[in-house]
Amino acid sequence: MLTLPRGARRLKSARHQTHADGGTEVSARVAQLLGRVDAAEPERMEREILRLSREFDGGPADPVVSEEMKRQARAMLDPALAAHIRFAHDNIRRFADMQRAALIDCEMEVIPGLIAGQRQIPVDCAGCYVPGGRYVHIASALMTVTTARAAGVGKIVAATPPRQGGLHPAVTYALDIAGADRILALGGVQAVAALAHGAFGGRPADVIAGPGNALVAEAKRQLYGEVGIDMVAGPTDSLVIADRSAHPAWVAADLVGQAEHGATSPVWLVTDDADLAREIAVAVAHAIASLPEPNRVAAAAAWEDWAEIILCDGRETMAQVADLYAPEHLHVQAGDLDWWLGRLRCYGSLFLGEEVTVPFGDKVSGPNHVLPTARAARYTGGLSVQKFLRTVTWQRADRRAADRLALSAAALSRAEGMEGHARSAELRCTPPALRTA
């Protein structure tokens, strides 16, 4: 259990403090599945991936989504829903384009005669994973592929689990308009392996991005190094800061909306008003009871086992608690929003004021919803165009700079005991006799 700062106490504590992610059992299972693919000869690799797909998902004989399938998905889709998907895509693309424009190639004269610079180079191929499960993850399809496309990635391959042998038309449509070059009806560990190896006519991914279950997260972790990954994410989490100005029913709806993700999804309320805390707790019970059954069961379990209510003696203590928890989603429903924007430091994505809500960011507003969980926001941000770019550096020098650089480089090299480095540096010195020695 995290130790709260002075001036904060728990009115409701979570029953559980850490997630049981399967540990060595999940790790061993994923290693075994990846080994089945890795051990296969190149011509047999795809057959092994298809065996796994049929075993776990009842996947199709050919996982590649054809142009005809894309046309059918567009025809099946309700036009109003298609318009909403395009609205979300346009917002996500505009935000990603802004991020890309902020990452520039540049150079400077470090000392007279020495020019150094950096370039932003997109990876050649990105693999984008879209989870399946209980919900239809339309927004995840947009968040990963759109961002890779805005970064300038040359080839984008997406994979998502099949449903009754095919894909949901809304997910297919979202992946298509976002710019996926190839779509695979594959899920789980076998999909991550297919993306990494470039199976089914694809190109081996340089980076694999996108959320997934514990097996998918572990597969990405085990493949990291062979490929890049965005992050290893766990169950989603959300923290709401509320003062007396907050509407109890709205705060409750925001907490329950995030709790319905699953029985292991933590939500936290941080407030400086005990009466408000009690009102919100009552409103949460009503909000959970009003959900349809599958959602109600998940939200009730998450609230009972993982939720916390923390009472603080003022806004600075509330901010300290928020930074301590470093939530994936941080929603401030309190006065003086500019103060909170300047003060808060550890979060995946910040939502300021009651006019916005986490579902805006999760679905349509533009900033990415693939975010760090389990306090990882202390040291990393969410998915952005940067995950698909390599910031590389370069340098060149004229004779003026080379003489000065060689003097210091040789001195430092010899101080470190690296005589070969020193001699290499001194070859760049004048007089010419030294250069040819």
Image (cartoon, rainbow, N blue to C red):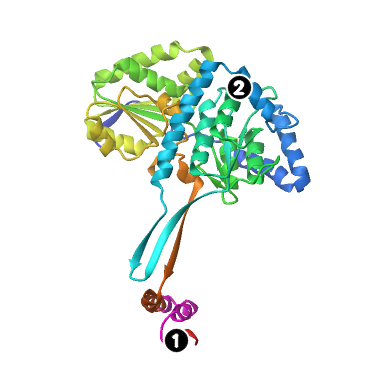
Taking 249 as reference, is 344 above or below it? below
Q: Position of residue 314 (x, y in %)?
A: 21, 31
* Direction from residue 337 to residue 267 in the image, left or right: right
Q: Quadrant of residue 288?
A: top left
Amino acid, disc 1: Pro
For image coordinates 44% across by 38% down, the residue present is: 96
**Labels 1 and 2: the sequence-earlier one:** 2
* Direction from residue 113 to residue 393 in the image, left or right: right
Mark 1 and mark 2: span between their CA atoms? 71 Å
Tell me the magenta residue range: 413-433
Q: Mark 1–mark 2 contact, CB under 8 Å?
A: no
Within 10 angstroms of label 2, few (less than 14), some, or many (20 or more) residues?
Answer: some
Q: Which mark is residue 74?
A: 2
- Between residue 244 and residue 371, name the one nearer to us: 371
Q: Position of residue 368 (x, y in %)?
A: 44, 34
Q: Magenta stretch: dominant SS?
A: helix
Q: Which mark is residue 432?
A: 1
Taking 148 as reference, is 399 above or below it? below
Q: Quadrant of residue 348?
A: top left
- Between residue 70 and residue 424, name the one nearer to us: 70
